[in-house]
Amino acid sequence: MTQVLLSNARLIDPEAGTETVGAVLVANGLIAQVLSNTAEIEAIRQNADQVVDCGGKVLAPGIVDLGVKVCEPGERHKESFRSAGRAAAAGGVTTMITRPDTTPVIDSPEQLEFIARRAAQDAPVNIHPMAALTKGRQGREMVEIGFLLDAGAVAFSDCDGVVTDTKVFGRCLTYARSLGALVIAHPQDPGLSAGAATTSGKFASLRGLPAVSPMAERLGLERDLTLVEMTGARYHADNLSTAVALPALARAKAAGLDVSAGVNIHHLTLNELDVGDYRTFFKIKPPLRSEDDRLAMVEAVGSGLIDIISSMHTPQDEESKRRPFEEAASGAVALETLLPAALRLYHAGQLDLAQLFRALSLNPAKRLGLPSGRLTAGAPGDLVLFDPDAPLVLDRFTLHSKSKNTPFDGARLQGKVLKTWVAGTEVFSRV
């Protein structure tokens, strides 16, 4: 049994909500002990196979990133499991929950098994795939949820393809409820949001861009939650971004519905004004919102109303982005920028590190029934060591992702990942 002692670290325990100074002993791929007593640490140091001095930097559970797009099969030139895995390790992401909106769509057990094999061969981090909710993400016919669960699907989602037929969506929720499956949806009224490139308001009008009202998100969420109340299904809203949607979420949680919600890191750290003069790297889905909406999202994460922060990593090639704003593809790569961008909220005094890692690691793991995301004995040795104060000027061409479409290109950030471990094995080191 190999024993690795990670000593002299600031330990972040998102489950207890604490930050302490101490050490972590990893043995046989699992956290064996979390130590704070100096004498105990010294005694274990004598027998450990390897000792890593963390230099007083922060040691936390590895990030569990819910909603990563890896473009295999079909668009491997944008992102592969090999490149996404390297990017994840460099960003402190030890578990990726991958989306099914590939070409072709992941909607059968055979395709899911292909994904699992490629991931195991090529990626140094854990990968758990989602499957589509309807065949071809067309919103007409439910997939074989039971067979896909058996094949390893951790959740079911049509991603940004809204199932507009309420009868079909209700049936999907009912069947998922009978099997205990988690349904992940992107709340949006597709009629209102069709063709939109930004959020409605003065800025969109001045730029002459087609826009969507924040009410489209509220309408979509209200409909979904009504059907969840009817069926009793497990439901996650993957990408909330507007203040007007939050009261509906609060009511659903207060009523005891099995619902959770997530927010994209870009909606926590950027706003609609960052689009500037039609900068297409800032075009994401849903579009960037007002500063009031951004602050409301940050507050909701702090209070626990919003459970999960994710990257919504969406690679796009240069040809897809170097187009007029209305025509440019939506999405941004974010596996490597997720943590330094999230640390903007820490440095601004809006969230502490335990709150951040509750949303980045613990809550997504709990929602998906995974053992990771914790800094406790018996949990997997999936860990990230980082310096929250290290300055960083991001150069997109240094990113490990094949695609380089990040809105943070040239941005001044604080926070660098120093080392990443998966099951106690070092998969990334900057030092």
Image (cartoon, helix red, strand yellow):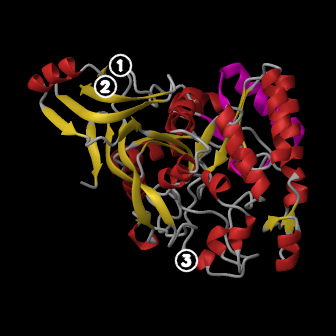
Q: Indicate whether 23 appears above or below 121.
A: above
**Distance (Cα) linking label 1 and label 3:** 45 Å
Could you say where residue 399 lies in the image, as x and y percent from the top left? 41, 65
* Disc 3 crowd, CA 10 A, few/some/many (<14, 14-19, 20+): some
- Closer to the chain start, of discs 2 and 3, is 2
- Closer to the chain start, of discs 1 and 3, is 3
- Quarter of the picture holding the C terminus: bottom left
For the point 56% across and 35% down, which residue is it? 355
Q: State which mark lies toward you, 2 or 1.
A: 1
> Which residue lies under the disc numbered 1?
377
The disc label shown at residue 167, or none:
none
To which quarter of the image does residue 366 belong? top right
**Distance (Cα) linking label 2 and label 3:** 41 Å
Identify residue type, mark 3. Glu
Does the image show residue 161? no
Q: Secondary structure at mark 3?
A: helix
Q: CB atoms at circles 2 and 1 under 8 Å apart?
A: yes
Could you say where residue 375 lies in the image, as x and y percent from the top left? 40, 27
Q: Which residues are magenta?
A: 155-184
| Residue 177 shown in magenta | yes
- Closer to the chain start, of discs 2 and 1, is 2
From the viewer's perspective, is 166 left or right of 398? Answer: right
Does the image show residue 145? yes
> Which residue lies under the disc numbered 2?
30
| Residue 28 shown in magenta | no
Q: Residue furthest left?
A: 46
Q: CB atoms at circles 1 and 3 under 8 Å apart?
A: no
> Which residue lies under the disc numbered 3?
318
Identify residue type, mark 1. Ala
Identify residue type, mark 2. Leu
Q: State which mark lies toward you, 2 or 3.
A: 2
